[in-house]
Image (spheres, coloured by chain):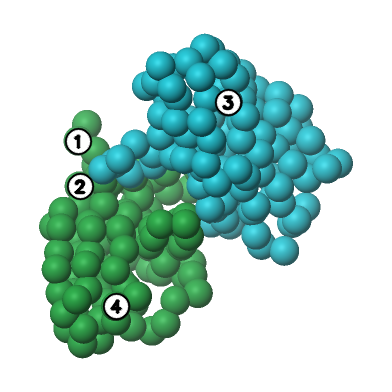
């Protein structure tokens, strides 16, 4: 029940295309869902996060879509750029606990 | 503000040895957590310290231990190293209560031969 399942494991998208990464969870007590971006040789950095009281959150080219009934959330990257090539992790937590449960990661490659 | 600093950047050890990794959080951050990252396994939570007290612990054997000092700096120790301990060890800090955003260091790459 504590798992967060992330797919796909890897993704290749053409420059200018839309990248979509999906995550699913079981624990309905989760109330915080962040996405982290990690470049080679660096630690992850928070990209965008959402709480279950909204179904969508957008920051620039990055959008989180959240489906509470399906217990799924996804990251959409519009107009994908080569600089977006990185590994993306979804995660979930219960706010009172602060302990994040992480997805396995998606390696995204944007082809020029 | 300086970011999260982890030292050393790389370490090579042999089986059976022990190792200590260091993490200096962002100034003012009172919470430090440690993660193990291996290819295909994502990030596995080790433990979190807040004001020198361990607040959460992941599912790792007792060979993995940590501590936090009064200045919020943290160390992680792994005793009796095994080949499977080879990984990138990441430290993350956050202000403490009321903030869920983690700030990660670049990690220590540990290789056990």
Q: Is mark 1 on a helix, strand or loop?
A: loop
Let me know if residue A36 appears in the view.
Answer: no
- Which color was chain B given? green
| Distance Cα–Cα, label 1 vs label 3 | 32 Å
Vertical comparison of A88 with B43: above or below? above
Q: Are the residues under badges 1 and 4 in a single subunit? A: yes
Residue beneath disc 2: B5
Residue beneath disc 4: B83
Is tag 4's residue or tag 2's residue first in the polypeptide sequence? 2
- Label 3 lies in what chain? A
Q: Do the residues labelled 1 and 2 touch (CB within 8 Å)?
A: yes
Q: Which of marks 1 and 2 is in front?
A: 2
- Dot 2, how many residues are within 10 Å of its Cα: few (below 14), some (14-19), or many (20+)? many
Q: Which residue is drawn at 57% across and 51% down?
A: A103
Let me know if residue A14 appears in the view.
Answer: yes
Figure quadrant of residue A51 = top right
Q: Is residue A78 left or right of residue A69?
A: left
- Dot 3, how many residues are within 10 Å of its Cα: few (below 14), some (14-19), or many (20+)? many
Picture coordinates of residue B52, whole percent (x, y): 32, 65
Q: What element carries label 2?
A: strand
Residue beneath disc 1: B2
Q: Which residue is drawn at 53% across and 35% down?
A: A11
Picture coordinates of residue A8, whole percent (x, y): 60, 43
| Distance Cα–Cα, label 2 vs label 3 | 32 Å
Q: Which of A33 and A40 is in front in this view?
A: A40
Q: In this view, does A54 lie to the left or right of A77?
A: right
| Distance Cα–Cα, label 4 vs label 2 | 26 Å
Picture coordinates of residue B45, whole percent (x, y): 46, 62
Which one of the lettered chains is coloured cyan? A
Residue beneath disc 3: A19
Vertical comparison of B50 with A112: above or below? below
Q: Are the residues under badges 1 and 3 in a single subunit? A: no
């Amino acid at each position: 029940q504590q798992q967060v399942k992330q797919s796909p494991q890897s993704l290749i998208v053409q420059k200018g295309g839309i990248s979509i990464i999906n995550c699913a969870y079981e624990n309905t007590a989760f109330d915080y869902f962040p996405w982290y971006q990690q470049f080679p040789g660096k630690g992850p950095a928070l990209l965008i996060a959402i709480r279950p009281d909204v179904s969508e959150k957008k920051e620039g080219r990055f959008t989180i879509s959240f489906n509470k009934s399906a217990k799924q959330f996804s990251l959409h990257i519009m107009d994908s750029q080569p600089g977006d090539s990185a590994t993306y992790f979804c995660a979930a937590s219960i706010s009172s606990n602060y302990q994040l449960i992480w997805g396995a990661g998606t390696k995204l490659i944007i082809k020029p | 503000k300086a970011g999260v600093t982890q030292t050393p950047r790389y370490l090579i050890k042999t089986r059976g040895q022990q190792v200590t990794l260091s993490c200096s959080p962002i100034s003012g951050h009172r919470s430090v957590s440690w993660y193990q990252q291996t290819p295909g396994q994502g990030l596995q939570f080790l433990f979190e310290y807040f004001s020198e007290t361990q607040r959460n612990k992941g599912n790792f054997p007792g060979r993995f231990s940590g501590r936090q000092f009064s200045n919020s700096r943290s160390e992680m120790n792994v005793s009796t190293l095994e080949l499977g301990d080879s990984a990138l060890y990441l430290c993350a800090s956050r202000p403490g209560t009321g903030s869920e955003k983690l700030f990660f260091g670049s990690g220590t790459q540990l290789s056990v031969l």
